[in-house]
Amino acid sequence: MATIFSRIVKGEIPCYKIAENDKFFAFLDINPVAKGHTLVIPKHETDYLFALDDMELAEMTVFAKKVALAIEKAIPCKRIGVAVIGLEVPHAHIHLIPITQEGDMDFKKEHVHMSEEEFLEVQRSIVERF
Ligand code: AMP
């Protein structure tokens, strides 16, 4: 059965898309740790990031870098933190999170609640800078 992320790539489930190319796809996390929290995934369905072959992982990192630089320009922050967890969705993904301090990467803290309008505004702002 297709993962929820594969269904997002196919357009079967809506998302706030940030960018895509032939191999990778980036969209806003629906339960963000911080405003601008974005997920980067390979279109090709693989459960575990480090199960990707070397070339695909390298290309995904380069794609994620481009997304991260756009987020950094769009969202006030010191840096873009990077996390790989993958315990919830069995489709490889990289979390890109705008941070100003270490605690901003804490997935256990209360997540940010964003309205539809806020998601759309964050999406627009990042897409514009991509
Ligand atoms: P993990 O697999 O532990 O790295 O977490 C999966 C992440 O995917 C979580 O941060 C979720 O909020 C996020 N997520 C799950 N479903 C969706 C969705 N439909 N759209 C956007 N993000 C999602």
Image (cartoon, rainbow, N blue to C red):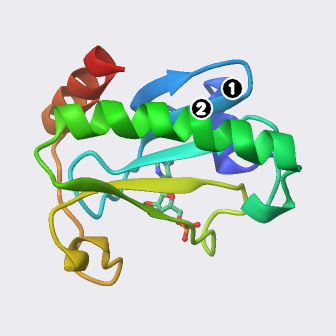
In whole angstroms, how far apart are the C-alphas of marks 1 and 2? 11 Å
**Residue 13 in view:** no
Q: Position of residue 124 (x, y in %)?
A: 24, 21
What's the residue type where badge 1 is placed? Lys
- Which structural element holds mark 2? strand
Question: For residue 10, which numbered disc appears in the image?
Answer: 1
Work out which residue is located at the far left of the displayed protein and give it.
Answer: 76
What's the residue type where badge 2 is placed? Phe
Quadrant of the image for the C terminus?
top left
Q: Is residue 84 left or right of residue 112?
A: right
Is there a contact, CB below 8 Å, between mark 1 and mark 2?
no
In the rendered image, which residue does mark 2 sit on? Answer: 25
- Residue for point 24% across, 69% down: 111
Q: Is residue 69 left or right of residue 42?
A: left
For mark 2, does the 10 Å Cα neighbourhood hold few (<14), some (14 to 19), or many (20 or more) residues? many
Q: Position of residue 103 (x, y in %)?
A: 22, 79
